[in-house]
Amino acid sequence: MTLGPDRRLVTLGLAGLGLAAAKVPPLGLIAPADGPGTLSAGLITRGPDGRVLRQVALGRAWGVDGTFRPFKLDAPFRVASVSKMIATVAILPLFAAKGISLDSDASDHLGFRLRHPAFPDDLITPRMLLSHTSGLRNGPSYPVPLGHALSEAFLLGGRHYDDGQWFGPATYRPGAWFTYADVNFALLAQMTEALSGDRFDVFMHQALFAPLGLDIGYNWSGVSAAKRSKAAAGMRWLNGAWTPQVDAPPPPFPELFLAKAKDIPGVKLADYRLGENGFLTSPLGGLRLSLKDMDGLAQNFAAKGKWRGRQIMDPESLSQMAIPAWSLDLAHRNGQTDEGVFQSYGLGMQTPMGVPGPTGDAFFGPGTANWRGHLGDAYGWMTGLFWNVKDGRTLVWAINGMPETERPAGLNSTLTRPEEILVNWGLGS
């Protein structure tokens, strides 16, 4: 999830942004053919009884044949940081089954000693990785590619050490400061491989996706050829034209998308050693799925892990995820909020406080503190998967084609204005 000062800046002149409360779909969200703005948008909301309240698919998607097609709710795409929450659902039960305390030394299952140079005697724990309080950052070499070991980013002398830029300032002790960083989940995936004996993407398929009957996967792993043929690429407006950023097209079945080391010609997936590099299949953002798939997952979360009469997700893990592990302390500043997007965070899950106003996290109005889930933002896709723990409502959305900078600012929260309008329409407000 690529956030920061760019997430809510200067308001652009997108057409029709005053349609938030309309009963008709917010057609004005979609940019004119000559851009820039929003290329496509989709949403599904359900009420406490599980019935669909509103659903819509708007605009166009760049298809696998290199042409535009209507965007549909069954089109798979890169969901960005929602991936972290889905990964956590399977990681926590594995750790529990293996007797791994969330407050133990992550180094024990990484294959190298992970320490912040300024705090060499302080453990960096799984809980810190899950809650982004580890003291780590995404370094300049992010992501470490296939063929290189992730340990090289953290050990002095490693080719990806980057002068220690994977570590935060010496004034922020691990466990005491929140900074959202993708690398935390690369390390968790690496631990998962060591504990499970399976590559992370394969582990996720066996532990969660297959039991749920979902044709989804990290970096396209396990996703069928039929599903790939419906893919929607991540897009941006560049030099007066819509330009693909990712998945144009996806790799042919059964191949995966892999970031490969340029200094190792011919490096391939078969060369990978388990537990060597958790970036491999992108647990941090690389899950490919559709809005219909997101809707199914949201229903499962709302039902405390039950799916079609079976307990698929571990309810104890879900409870742990939903408890704030970090919350913003205004009196004694203890984290970076990315312009207010993050004000409270559990384990791999956003736990919004419902702070009102354009710098707050009241994404869903006055009752926002009852919602749990995660936002995503990368390669043109802005996504959200949330549910209400009090009344069981669910909400999933995706918007494609938003600019990287100078995005239309939300009026009532740190969501962008297009997200705000789509969400408000979906919730009937």
Image (tube, rainbow, N blue to C red):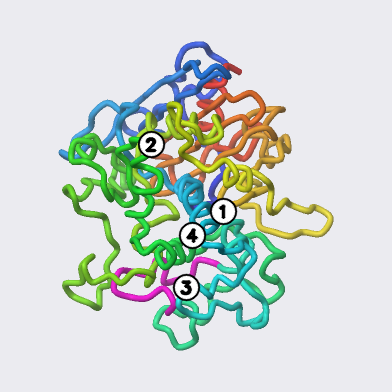
Foreground: disc 1 or disc 2: 2
With respect to residue 218, does 424 lie above or below?
above
Identify the residue at image location x=61%, y=18%.
Answer: 429
Tell me the residue that label 4 is attached to. Answer: 185
Disc number at residue 110? 3
**Mark 3 vs mark 4: which is more N-terminal?**
3
Query: Disc 2 and disc 4: Cα gap in Å?
Result: 22 Å
Query: Disc 3 and disc 4: Cα gap in Å?
Result: 12 Å
**Mark 3 vs mark 2: which is more N-terminal?**
3
Q: In front: 334, or 21?
A: 334
Kindly state the secondary structure of the residue where label 4 is placed: helix
- The magenta stretch spans which residues? 137-152
Tell me the residue that label 2 is attached to. Answer: 212
Kindly state the secondary structure of the residue where label 2 is placed: helix
**Mark 4 vs mark 1: which is more N-terminal?**
1
Judged from this view, the residue extending furthest toward the top is: 23
Foreground: disc 3 or disc 2: 2
**Mark 1 vs mark 3: which is more N-terminal?**
1
